[in-house]
Image (cartoon, rainbow, N blue to C red):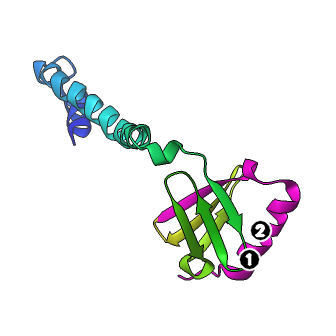
């Protein structure tokens, strides 16, 4: 809205003081945009830094029954039925316990054979539910 008003004023009266009076609003708009885009990154980063369990080494055992996560802070078994879908990207597998939340499993944690077996277990046990 502010941008459109400035463009209209620039076209109608390029030498007017009205356009120069909008400079503080443009600066505010730019700052707001930067803050809006940077906030999620900063929030996620501070949450990760403040969580000891996020930094702990995690061991994952994969079986026909599901996944078993272990670290010094947790010991959790999760059946395959808890996941509604999965995705594979270049460096990760993402398992979704619901459509908006996912668990990242890095591919570097697997050997080539383990990765193939894991992919097959995902195909067999995690059916997309939309």
**Image marks 2 and 1: residues in contact by CB distance under 8 Å:** yes
For the residue pair 117 and 59, the one nearer the viewer reads as 59
| Residue 94 in the image: above or below residue 31 | below
Residue 92 lies in magenta, yes or no? no
Task: Name the residue at the right extreme.
Answer: 113
Q: Position of residue 82 (x, y in %)?
A: 54, 78
Residue located 45% across and 66% down the image: 100
| Residue 128 in the image: above or below residue 76 | below
Q: Dot 2, how many residues are within 10 Å of its Cα: few (below 14), some (14-19), or many (20+)?
A: some
Residue located 76% across and 67% down the image: 118
Q: Position of residue 80 (x, y in %)?
A: 62, 78
Residue located beneath label 1 in the image: 123
Q: Position of residue 46 (x, y in %)?
A: 38, 38
Residue located 25% across and 39% down the image: 4
- Residue 112 sits in quarter: bottom right
| Residue 46 in the image: above or below residue 120 | above
| Residue 115 in the image: above or below residue 31 | below
- Residue 8 sits in quarter: top left
Residue located beneath label 2 in the image: 119
Residue 118 lies in magenta, yes or no? yes
- Give the mark count: 2
Q: Position of residue 96 (x, y in %)?
A: 55, 68
- The quarter of the image holding the N terminus is top left
For the residue pair 6 and 108, the one nearer the viewer reads as 108
Q: Which residues are magenta?
A: 101-130
Q: Secondary structure at mark 2?
A: helix
In the shown orientation, is residue 69 left or right of residue 111?
left
For the residue pair 9 and 67, the one nearer the viewer reads as 67
In the shown orientation, is residue 3 left or right of residue 120?
left
Q: Secondary structure at mark 1?
A: helix
């Amino acid at each position: 809205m502010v941008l459109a008003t400035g463009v209209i004023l620039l076209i109608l009266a390029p030498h007017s003081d009205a356009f120069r009076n909008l400079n503080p609003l443009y600066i505010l708009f730019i700052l707001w945009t930067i803050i809006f885009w940077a906030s999620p990154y900063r929030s996620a980063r501070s949450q990760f830094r403040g969580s000891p369990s996020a930094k702990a080494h995690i061991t994952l055992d994969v079986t026909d029954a599901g996944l078993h996560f272990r670290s010094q802070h947790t010991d959790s078994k999760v059946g395959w039925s808890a996941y509604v879908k999965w995705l594979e990207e270049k460096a990760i597998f993402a398992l979704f316990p619901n459509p908006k939340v996912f668990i990242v499993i890095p591919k570097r944690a697997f050997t080539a054979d383990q990765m193939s077996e894991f992919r097959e277990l995902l195909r067999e046990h995690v059916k997309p539910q939309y």
